Amino acid sequence: MRKTPNAELVAYVEQAILPRYATFDAAHREDHARTVIAQSLSLAQIINDSPRYVNDDGMKTLVDIDMAYAIAAYHDTGLVEGRDTHHIVSARIIRADKTLLKWFTPEQIEIMADAAEDHRASSKRPPRTIYGRIVAE
């Protein structure tokens, strides 16, 4: 399994997604997104390298590095419509971005959208997937 995200995906995010953070509040600018990306990739690698992470079926949990990267990059893009529902709007932005189909299946995009919805610290339920747990951390 790769340890770094797909270079084309990174180029797309750098050009089309990260610049969106320039208009957000000071705590959610591009440096915040880059920090979340770095931490998410680090957590994904720890999970992939550790024998501790096993699914209920006894199979090893493996985190797709490209998915972890994209989720982290998009997680706060919904701030474009305000803070209160930004997690839901971020998920909608992920689902609507047809360019993501170059790298992900519709099923993967849905998991990514769910993770964006689940990242909010004030959520009343735990994240649904490992990806939601990663970006919430």
Image (cartoon, helix red, strand yellow):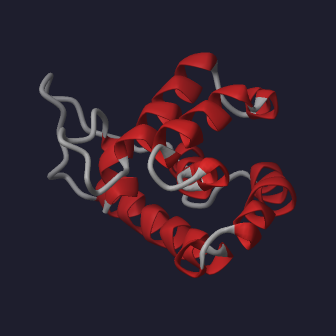
**Depth check: 59 or 74 in front?**
74
Above or below for 92 versus 1: above
Residue 91 picture location, percent across and down? 55, 35
Residue 132 can be seen, yes or no: yes
Query: Image quadrant for the C terminus?
Result: bottom left
**Depth check: 20 or 66 in front?**
20
Question: Quarter-wise, where is residue 125 in the image?
Answer: top left
Residue 118 picture location, percent across and down? 35, 42
Above or below for 103 versus 50: above
Side of 86 relative to 4 (left or right): left
Residue 32 picture location, percent across and down? 55, 75
Q: Give the residue displayed 46% in from the left and 29% down from the top.
A: 111
Q: Residue furthest top?
A: 106
Q: Give the residue displayed 61% in from the left and 57% down from the top.
A: 73
Side of 34 relative to 87 (left or right): right
Side of 50 relative to 38 (left or right): left
Above or below for 10 versus 94: below
Q: Give the residue displayed 18% in from the left and 42% down from the top.
A: 124
